[in-house]
Amino acid sequence: MATSQSVPALRYVDASFSYGGSPTLTGVTGEVQPGKALALIGPNGAGKTTLLRGILGTVRVSGTMEILGRGDGKVPKGAIGYVPQVADLDATFPVTVRQVVMMGLYAELGWLRRPGASHRGRVDAVLDRVGLTDRANLRFGELSGGQRQRVLLARSIVASPRMILLDEPFNGLDEPNREALLEIIHSVKQEGVAVVVSTHDLKLAYECCEDVALLAGRQIAFGPIDSVLTPDNLQKAYGSRSTDEFVGSGLEEALHVG
Ligand SMILES: Nc1ncnc2c1ncn2[C@@H]1O[C@H](COP(=O)(O)OP(=O)(O)OP(=O)(O)O)[C@@H](O)[C@H]1O
């Protein structure tokens, strides 16, 4: 878990992100302190996932990007937890909930992947934390979508990361699962973990994030949520698109504020 409040967990200055050709996302400047959360907000194709991939080192980044105080991309094993947008696990794959969470320790376990009692204890503790102890031996595919999302979050935090990246984690979740996920995010923040979450859900941003990066192929604005999510900035990001598709997300209300 994080120990220093002075070194940002993530800091980038005029960073650009590309898949090899011309940049997909440009002009990104901002930082996330340990124990704080940043929401990445923007329309489809804005570059939210791309920015997360930049942190993970799977897309090309130019400009400055420092992760946990390092600018060389050499992040300690297990220091970043990741919950992808689309589950990277086939729900029909015969693997138990406990095994899925254990995957979060693979970097520590090495290629033999032989967990000891302490690894099993950590998996049990994190399953308890996400409220799924009684589901531990079920097949992953037998769980509801929201429960699966909680398992994937458990997998991302079992190695005690210093930063977690969540790609649209609340898509399609019902209220109890949404609440459960929010509570876990709040509790890991209290332990000093930095959180970066891509979301279309502005309410979520208000509920758990201090800062927002508003993106639309470039960074429109970065900073405290109230100063970024202004009608003017949202219009810049979303243009003249109908707000119908955002009903319930908080965007429609935000665009009509003031
Ligand atoms: N592997 C890839 N190779 C090339 N271009 C890609 C790749 N993945 C995404 N892109 C492009 O990068 C741009 C940004 O996509 P990205 O997935 O980062 O947007 P997003 O803001 O996360 O969108 P959404 O809200 O729909 O998930 C899009 O134009 C997309 O087509």
Image (cartoon, rainbow, N blue to C red):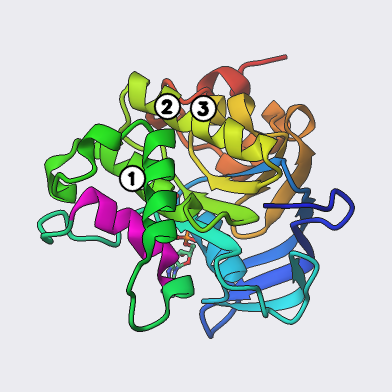
Badge 2 amino acid: Ala
- Badge 3 marks a residue whose secondary structure is helix
Mark 1 Cα within 10 Å, few/some/many (few <14, many 20+)? many
- Residue 59: give x, y in percent of width and height: 54, 76
Residue 69, by quadrant, is bottom right
Lower position in the chain sequence, tag 2 or tag 1: 1
Give the main secondary structure, helix, strand or loop, of the magenta stretch: helix
- Residue 216: give x, y in percent of width and height: 60, 53
Residue at image x 61%, y 64%? 79
Q: Quadrant of ligand 1?
A: bottom left
**Which numbered disc covers residue 88?**
none
Please name the residue that numbered disc 3 is placed on: 183
Give above or below for 258 relative to 190: above
**Residues at circles 2 and 1 in contact by the CB criterion of under 8 Å:** no
- From the viewer's side, name the closer residue of 162 and 208: 162
Badge 1 amino acid: Val
**Residues at circles 3 and 2 in contact by the CB criterion of under 8 Å:** yes
**Which numbered disc covers residue 151?**
1
Residue 97 shown in magenta: yes
Segment tinted magenta in the rendering: 96-106
Tell me the CA gap for discs 3 and 2.
5 Å
- From the viewer's side, name the closer residue of 80 and 219: 80
Tell me the CA gap for discs 2 and 1.
12 Å
- Residue 155: give x, y in percent of width and height: 40, 53
Is the residue marked 2 within 8 Å of ligand 1, measured from its CB? Answer: no
Give above or below for 49 relative to 223: below
Residue 251 at least partly seen: yes
- Badge 1 marks a residue whose secondary structure is helix
- Residue 50: give x, y in percent of width and height: 53, 64
Residue at the front extreme, as displayed: 117
Residue 205 at least partly seen: no
